[in-house]
Amino acid sequence: MTNAAVHMEGQLHAPVHGAVATGAVHAKGQQHPIKLYLVVWGWLFVLSTCSYLVDYFGLHGYLRWSLILLFMVLKAGLIVAVFMHMAWERLALAYAILLPPVVVLVFVSIMVLESDYTHFLRVLFFATPS
Amino acid sequence: MAETVLTNPGQSPARPEGWRGVADDWASDQRAFKNVSWGKAMMWIFLLSDTFIFSCFLLSYMTARMSTTVPWPNPSEVFALNIAGKHIPLILIAIMTFILISSSGTMAMAVNFGYRRDRVRTAALMLATAAFGATFVGMQAFEWTKLIMEGVRPWGNPWGAPQFGASFFMITGFHGTHVTIGVIFLIAIARKVFRGDFDVERRGFFTSRKGYYEIVEITGLYWHFVDLVWVFIFAFFYLW
C-alpha cells in the first residue's frame, strides 16, 4: 500500500518533469561507445569465419559438432548481450526472456529419444538391405 | 496518465539487484519490468514466442534428419558454387551470413545515433541495414531458384532423404519472410526518423500517439533477432 501511495504521489507531483526525465533515461539508458559495437561486430566476423572454416576444412565427428556449437553459442551470446542490450537490462527481464528458450532443450531431448525410436523401427521393418 | 505511469521507473529510488531484484520486480501487484517501456517489453515477448516457432522448425528438422534411414544430402556440396572456375563449398551461405552480420552492425549503430538524436545518421544507417537485408533476401531467392532448377522439391530431391526439401523451404522460407518484414519495418521507421517525427513528437498516423527514438531500438531488437535466428539456422542446417 505504501509503495502504491508513493508512486501515486510521484505521478501527481511531477508529470511534466517526468516526461523530460524519461527522455533523459532513454538517452542515458542504452548509450554505449560506438567502439564497443565495432569490436563486437569484428568478433562476429571472426567467429563466422571460424565456423565457415570448420566446413571448408571438412572437419568430422565430435570435433566438428562441438566447434559448430561453440561458435554458434558465442555469436548468439554476443548478439543478445551487446547488440540487443540484454547485458544492461534488469535481471527480471533477462530471466523472463532467456530462461524459457533454455527449457526447449527438454523438448530437444524428448525428440532425440523419439527419433531414435522411429529410426530403430524403420531399420527393423522398412529399410531395404543395401 | 499513461505517460506519467511510464515515467515512474525513472523516478523511483534504486531497486535491489540480483535474485532479490528478480523476486522484488515480479512480486506483488505491480509492473514486472521496471525500466522497460511497454513497447520494448512486448517486442521481447513477441521475440520469445518467435523463438519457440523457430525452435519447432529446427526440432522437426532434427527429428526428420535423425529418424530417416536414407542418407541426408551434404549441405556443403548442395550449396557449393563455382566461382572463377573454382569449386567452393557453402560459399553462398557464408556470404549471406556476413551480409546479415554487417546489417546487424549498422543497426546497432543506428540505435546508438538514435539515442543521440542524430536523425540523419540514424536514418542513413537504418536504410543501409535495410539494403543489406534486401541483398540477403535477393541471394536467398537466387539460392531457391538454383535448388528448384536442380530438382529440389518439398517431397524429394536428387541427392538423398526426401525431407531435405521440406525442411529447407520451410526453415529458410520462414526466415526470409522475417527478413522481408524487417526490411519493410526498417524503411517505415527510417522515414519517420528522417522526417523528424521523434524530434517534434508528431503523432502517429494509426496510433495517434507520440513516438520516441526508442522505436529505433525496438526495430533493432527485431532485426538482431532475425540475425540471431540465422546463427542457429547456419549452424544446424548448413554446417551440421
Image: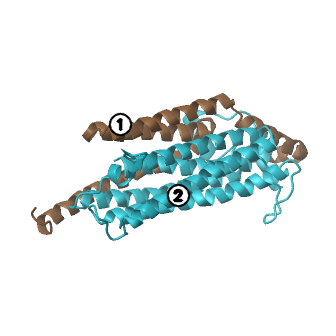
Chain colours: A brown, B cyan
> Residue A99 appears at what percent x and percent y?
48, 46
- Camera-side residue of A6 and B168: B168
Q: Amino acid at mark 2?
A: Asp
What's the distance in space between the residues labelled 1 and 2, CA to CA? 26 Å
Q: Amino acid at mark 1?
A: Leu
Q: Residues within 10 Å of mark 2 (few under 14, many from 20)?
A: some
Say which chain tag 1 marks: A
The quarter of the rendered structure image containing the N terminus of chain B is bottom right
Give the residue at mark 2: B50
Residue B229 higher or lower than B176, as above or below: above
Give the residue at mark 1: A67
> Residue B197 appears at what percent x and percent y?
84, 53
Let me know if residue A1 appears in the view.
Answer: no
- The quadrant where residue B186 appears: bottom right
Residue B169 higher or lower than B44, as above or below: below
Q: Residues within 10 Å of mark 1 (few under 14, many from 20)?
A: some
